[in-house]
Image: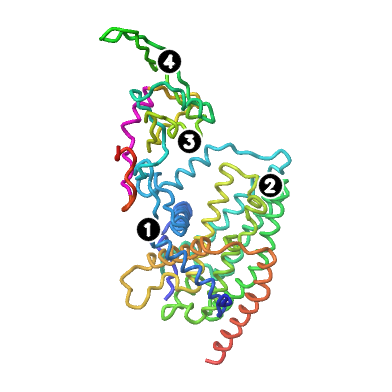
Amino acid sequence: MTAPQKTFGFGLGLVKGLSVTLRTMLRPAITVQYPHVKPVLPPRTRGVIALKQENCTVCYKCARECPDWCIYIDAHKEAHDPAGGGRARSAKILDRFAIDFSLCMYCGICVEVCPFDALFWSPEYEYAEYDITEMLHEKERLESWTTTVQPPPPLEDGAEAPEEAAS
Amino acid sequence: MIADSSVFDTLTSNFWLSLLLKTVACLLFFLVVPLVVGYMEHKVLAHGQGRLGPMEAGGFHGWAQLVADGVKFIQKEDIVPTAADRGVFSLAPGVVMIPYIVVIAVLPFSATVWALNLDVGVFFVLAMSSIGVIGVLMAGWSSANKFSLIGALRAAAQLIAYELPMVLASAAIVMQAGTMSLVGISEAQWQMWYVVYQPIGFLIFMIAVFAELSRPPFDMPVADSEIIFGAYTEYSGLKFAFFLLAEYGGIVVMTAIASVLYLGGYQPLRGLEMIPGPLWMMGKIFALSFVVIWVRVTFPRLREDQLQRFTWLWLTPLALLQILGVAYFKVAF
């Protein structure tokens, strides 16, 4: 271990400090002027949860796993007569899917547990409201965010191919 | 060499009209230049910390930020604490601000552009710039608040401690120039600025200026982490705005004095005579103001005892040495 180098000379430290601030002054600031310039966010940013309704089977897994109980799902069953005859097939129809973003803590468990890829993370973040009760967003709004979902970032070199690609 | 009359007197021979012109010019100077320095502080502080500072007000790089601040201060409620001494409390901002306006009258901007050429200019300036602290004491005492009182007493102790080296440093200048008139001192530096002869004096003077203005690293009277905002804690609205204006006005006035005493005031650098004197003076004021702000963004606050120790053990003896040196050369050559 070498002892920390002693600065000799009276007031040298003061001059050093001044030079640090002067150099910072001359460097351009990295501030992004937000409303005028939008930041470039990575594709996996957890901005908001988007819902693709046609993938949802109303299995309720997301609602049950949600630690905050902020997902509301209502559904009913409909019976269809199959074309070839036989017993009527029943299907669950999604009536309401809502996420209360004033309760959501953005843990992403619902996205993880969804067995049919109906929930996605989107980098969209501009959905502030003036009233906290306005933060409860219904399925139409959740659906609209699917357009902002980014494709996953490319795999690193030498990484294993994802399971979906192999099957 | 020194013109007997200022440019205002040559414009009109009527005494009262000339007086009116001078008053308006001084007030305009006080209302415009401190705001420019205040804006500069916003920007220099921000860039010194890698930020941008105000960018919205007025459109271009937030140039109207201080105008917007002024409008905000006017709209705010003017609160006087119940226990406060109403009269003294309301008078204090004026007592802090007016001396700096008065000092502007004696600032020379060229051999003819000045409002008042006092024979005791330096004396007048130093006396006036010390009046402000009475206003701070009034503010601190009348606020009926312990933090205000501590801040005011710190300000008073600091002024006494730093007024001494400041006066001694100026005395060395007066000795070398042979006059106390600010115009005369500027004229005496036509060959060489006094900072070349008295660099130590310049350093002492600038450090004392930081302390007089309660600027970091000597801002113990308003140390927000210890005593909230010192003597200004209870103030709001327009009265608080007056204190702020007095702070920036103080920066302008004190740096102007430092330019006159050490940087030749309106005297140009050799070979750059085509730039007129008033521009040189303004340039020096802004350059020194930049240094004041630059020091603020760089250094942390000293402790109260360190501040007192520094002035009594270092600045005052050094200033005395400077006087001795000047006196020696004055007599020997």
Classify B176 as above or below A111: below
Alpha carbon separation for disc pair 4 and 2: 73 Å
Q: Residue at x 47, y 34 (%)?
A: A109
Label 4 amino acid?
Ala
Residue highlighted by disc 4: A75
Whether residue B1 is visible here, answered yes or no, is yes
Q: Which residue is mark 1?
A: A28
Q: Who comes first in sequence, dot 4 or dot 3? A: 4
Q: Position of residue A108 (x, y in %)?
A: 46, 35
**Label disc, if present, on residue A106 of the rendered structure:** 3
| Nearest to the observer: residue B210 or residue B168 | B210
- Estimate how packed mark 2 is, as few (under 14), some (14 to 19) or many (20 or more) residues with alpha carbons within 10 Å: some
Q: Which residues are magenta?
A: A140-155
Q: Chain for mark 4? A: A
| Residue plotted at (41% across, 63% down) | B282
Which of A29 and B98 lies nearest the eye of the viewer?
A: A29
Label 1 Cα crowd, 10 Å radius (few <14 / some 14-19 / many 20+)? few
Chain ID, mark 3: A
Q: Which residue is identified by label 2?
A: B88
Q: CA distance from mark 1 to mark 3?
A: 34 Å
Whole-number angstrom distance, CA of label 4 to CA of label 3: 24 Å
Q: Would residue B100 be found to the left or right of residue B85 on screen?
A: left
